[in-house]
Structures are given as C-alpha cells and as structure tokens.
Amino acid sequence: MRRVIFFSALMALLIVTMMASTTVQIWSWRSQDAPVWKEVQKEMNAQGIDVKIDFRSFLPTEYDSKVQIALQGGKGPDIIYSRRLPGQRTQALIDAGLLIPIDDKVSLSHFNTSVLNFIKASDGKHYGVPFAVQVVGIFYNKDIYKKYGLKVPKTWSELVKNAEILKKNGVTPFFVPGKAGWALAMQHAMTGVSVLGPCWIKNLLDGQTNFLDPAWVHLNKLLNDLKPYYQKGFMGNTTDDLNAAFAFGQAAMVFYGVWGYGQWKELNPNINVGYFMVPPDCEYAQPWAYVFMDGSLALTSNSKHENMAIKVLQFAATPRFGTIFAKETLNIPAVKGATMPNVPLLQEVLKVAEEHASPYVYWVGSVLTSHSPSLYTDVLSPGMQAMYAGKITPEEFAKMAQDKISQWYKPLMKK
C-alpha cells in the first residue's frame, strides 16, 4: 500500500512538473517595459506556448555592471536588453562568449538593414532582436508656446530669441539635467548633427578635420552660452527631475528623446507636447534628427531555458510585438509592420526619423564610441559637465576630445 501511495505521489509530482510553465527571465534598464512583457506572455500563452516571463528592471546607472557581474559568474537571465553596436559594453560580452548569435534561430526579415547594423558584430553575426528606434531633439510645451506667441524656431538665433521671451515672462526656457552626464552628451550630439551637419561629421570620421576645428569649438560655445536659459541649480538635477518639471509645465523645452513622452503623459495626461529638430546656426542650412536603435533583446549563454527563450525572441521579431510595444510604451518599435497608436506626436517624430535622420553621427551608434577612451563616456559626458560647471573652456573641451580620441582612432592620429 505504501508503495502504491508513493508511486501515485511521484506520478502526480511528475505531472505537475511537466505541466508547469517554463520561466524565461529578462533583465532590462527600462522599467516602463513591464506592461509589454505581461501582454507578450498572455499572447504566447494564447498561442499554446506555456511560458512565464519574469521581467526585472534595474537602475540604468547600475544595469550594465549587474549584467556583467552576473553573466561572468555563470548566472544571470536568459535574455538581456543589450546596448547597441558598435559599443564597448556589448562587444565585451560577445568577446567573452556571454551572448549567443541568433542568425540561425530567429528570422530578422521584419527589420531594415540600417536597424540590423546596430546588432551586427565584427564577426558578421547578429546578436539580439532590436526593440525600439529612438529620436532625440527638442520637445516643447505647445500651450506655453501658444501663450507667448512663439513659433518653432528655424535657426539657433530664433531658438535663443524664444528663450529670451520666455525668461522675461518668468518662464524657465529649458530644463537641463546637469547631473546626468549621458543626457548632456545627448544634448551635444543632437545639436551637433544640425549645427555641424552630416558632411562635417563625415569629414571628422575620415580624418579630413578634427575636434580642434573652429566649427567644433563654435558648437561648444553655442551650448555654453545657452546656460542662462536653464533652470537654477541645473547641475544638480537628474532626468527624473526633468520628467517631472516638464510634465507639469515648469519648463517650456527639454533636449530629450521620444522615450520620455510616455512618462510625461503618465505624470500629466493633459500635457500638450510638440517636437522639433535642433535648429542649425544658419538660415540656409537644414536641421537633422539624431536617430538610433535603442537596444536589442540578446540571448545569453547562461540561459537555463534556451529553447523557450528563443521562442520569446521569435515573437519579439514580429510586427505583433511591435504593436504591443508601441501601445504600452508610446515608443517607436524597431520592427517593420507594427501598428502605431493614434498619437500625433509619435506620428510626427516617426516621419522625421524616416525623412531627416542624419546619416553620420558621433554619439550613440558611432565608431568613436567603440574603443576606450570613448567619445561618449570619456569625453562628451564629463566634458559637458566640466564646461557647464565652468571648469574648462569650450576650447579646452575641444582639446580634451582631440587628445583622447586621437589615442586610438587612426584617422585623427597625428602624422
């Protein structure tokens, strides 16, 4: 009798185990994506795929180190949100064998080549499924602009004039998160594509000019001279401060990315947001948008449930995933064929991305960030903070860039 009871209990345990969902763990720096994965799990379950998705988000400033430590220790999730290529952080994980190429596992037919280039490593293989396309520029409060009769500026001088009018009327023209070095680097880069232009950036990449060029110094001066129009104590503010201040009308404009829109609407559903590319410093030049692939969903070599993780990635590579992603985050999905929510701002930004994306850039997605010292983390972020704090001049900022990048980037090395 005991044997029968034991055998019955064992069989029951085996049946329960077999019926249990397979859990796929995903790590990210984007807390706003949690609702996306709840919907993905529901849809995959409805399709007969018995998966449970355990989505965990971490502070963006801590995320990369947590991923690296976990994966190097033989632990970590099945899927990570990985950064773009070229880029030191993702390349280091690839070189260490901690990420697995997905070319023979997931169809990438719903992605443009320009997007796929951001997940293509030097070995020619693709690491991850792209999840979003980001567009950065100046976002403004339409109601504040309307109240003071302001128009979208076509030149830098018109932008400054708008700021002067706002300041005279007691309105903070710009909210700038000086404590967030990455946001200042982004501000420099989005301004650079319009003020310098793609041709100048191409000449820089080809070694036909360098960071000591008067045009680069002039760009630094334009940004430094804009400081009087920032909020008081801006060097102590974070992007969380920016989101709250802009959402509740405490500043008219922000240099930011379209990913912020969902957060602003969540904080204040009544905010009326507009967007424009950073205007050039010449009435005869055209503005450009800084567009980049935000990141990808990468399969780790530590995955305990690789087969199910691959099924999750296969779903993430479909237009249906893009539709869910856009609806839940109000971000632009990287996959083609997704249905976008009927949000005028997103439609406007998407059109700008399709028609005015700068073909040459020097921040995210640039070869200048692929080695150390990186133009992003070792020059633009600390350099902007130092210049804004009055510790270095625009000229010294330019010399800093040239000295660091010429250490390894051959076209800029002294001959």
Image (cartoon, rainbow, N blue to C red):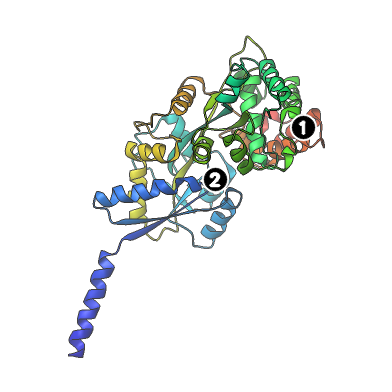
Indicate the position of residue 68 as horizontal and vertical percent values: 56, 55
Residue projecting furthest to the top: 284
Residue drawn at point x = 80 percent, y = 28 percent: 395
Q: Which mark is residue 91?
A: 2
Indicate the position of residue 239 as horizontal and vertical percent values: 62, 41
**Of residues 176 and 195, the one drawn nearer to the viewer in this rendering:** 176
Query: Mark 2 falls on what kind of element?
Result: helix
Quarter of the rendering occupied by the N terminus: bottom left
Decide which of tag 2 and tag 1 comes sooner along the chain: 2
Residue with the mark numbered 1: 397
The correct choice, above or below, for 282 with respect to 181 in the image is above
- Mark nearer the viewer, 2 or 1: 1
Query: Mark 1 falls on what kind of element?
Result: helix
Q: Is residue 51 left or right of residue 128?
A: left
Q: Residues within 10 Å of mark 1 (few under 14, many from 20)?
A: many
Q: Is residue 206 visible?
A: no
Give the CA separation, mark 2 to mark 1. Answer: 28 Å
Rendering quarter of residue 78: bottom left
Q: Is residue 67 visible?
A: yes
**Of residues 322 and 293, the one drawn nearer to the viewer in this rendering:** 322
How many numbered badges does the structure rendering display? 2
The correct choice, above or below, for 153 with respect to 342 in the image is above
Amino acid found under the numbered disc labelled 2? Gln
Residue drawn at point x = 49 percent, y = 62 percent: 75
Indicate the position of residue 282 as horizontal and vertical percent values: 66, 12
Residue drawn at point x = 63 percent, y = 42 percent: 241
Q: Is residue 232 left or right of residue 153?
A: right
The correct choice, above or below, for 105 with respect to 340 in the image is below
Q: Residues within 10 Å of mark 2 (few under 14, many from 20)?
A: many
Indicate the position of residue 344 as horizontal and vertical percent values: 44, 25
**Of residues 37 and 268, the one drawn nearer to the viewer in this rendering:** 268
